[in-house]
Image: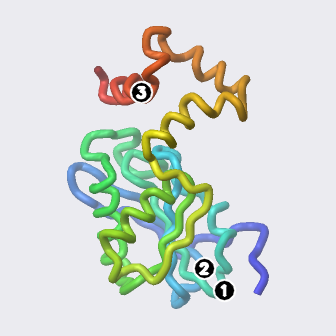
């Protein structure tokens, strides 16, 4: 079967209360009785997109997407309180249970690849396989490259980004961003 160029429309959507003041938005597309796959978006903070569905044949797969805490259409938007990897992994598991899926393929790109690996490690019995793209493992070297080494790939964009960071924080960009997000 040929994967469509245009993403298939969702057949189901809703909000799931995951606790601690968070509600995550989710959508399902493709074959309702197909092979279940959860697509984990990058970011953190970006949100899911129908375009990500083109990686899976909608005639074969039940495609589940959700916007992680503080991202996309999830509520409250931009919230960082109670928003950490362990909570996100718990949200994935709550969504699987809510949708009555026994096991599913876990797929992610960039930050979503990190989240997919953590989820798969903690819930092996609920994972039928893992598919990763644009892998980002969130280690010190990954983060250092993201905030400093990326200047070799996109120097103009990097300089525009750097111009927004106060000079005294430019050697500690991740710490500055964390402090800014926490309102400190």
For the residues carrying marks 3 and 2, which lies nearer the camera in this image? 3
Question: Measured along the vertical axis of the image, is residue 140 above or below residue 64?
Answer: above
- Drawn side of residue 157 relative to residue 36, left or right: right
| Mark seen at residue 177 | 3
Q: Position of residue 99 (x, y in %)?
A: 37, 78
What label does residue 139 carry, if any?
none
For label 2, the residue is 30
**What residue is shown with label 1?**
59
Q: Position of residue 2 (x, y in %)?
A: 78, 82
Q: From mark 3 to mark 2, how far is it between C-alphas?
A: 38 Å
N-terminal of the two: label 3 or label 1?
Answer: 1
| Residue 120 position by quadrant | bottom left
> Label 3: few (<14), some or many (≥20) within 10 Å?
some
Looking at the image, which residue sits at the far bottom? 33
Q: Secondary structure at mark 1?
A: loop
Quarter the C terminus occupies: top left
Outermost residue on the left side: it is 20
Above-or-below relation of 173 to 33: above
- Callouts 2 and 1 close, C-beta under 8 Å: yes
Q: Quadrant of residue 77?
A: top left
């Amino acid at each position: 079967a040929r994967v469509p160029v245009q993403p298939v429309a969702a057949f189901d959507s809703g909000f799931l209360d995951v606790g601690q003041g968070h509600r995550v938005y989710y959508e399902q597309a493709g074959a309702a009785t197909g092979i279940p796959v959860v697509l984990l978006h990058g970011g953190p903070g970006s949100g899911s997109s129908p375009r990500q569905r083109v990686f899976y044949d909608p005639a074969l797969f039940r495609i589940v997407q959700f916007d992680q805490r503080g991202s996309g259409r999830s509520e409250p938007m931009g919230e960082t309180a109670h928003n950490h990897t362990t909570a996100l992994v718990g949200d994935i598991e709550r969504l699987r249970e809510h949708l009555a899926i026994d096991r599913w393929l876990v797929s992610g790109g960039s930050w979503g690849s990190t989240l997919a690996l953590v989820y798969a490690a903690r819930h092996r019995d609920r994972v039928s396989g893992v598919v990763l793209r644009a892998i980002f493992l969130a280690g010190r070297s990954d983060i250092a490259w993201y905030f400093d080494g990326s200047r070799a790939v996109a120097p103009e964009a990097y300089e525009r980004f750097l111009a927004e960071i106060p000079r005294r924080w430019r050697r500690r960009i991740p710490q500055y961003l964390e402090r800014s997000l926490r309102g400190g």
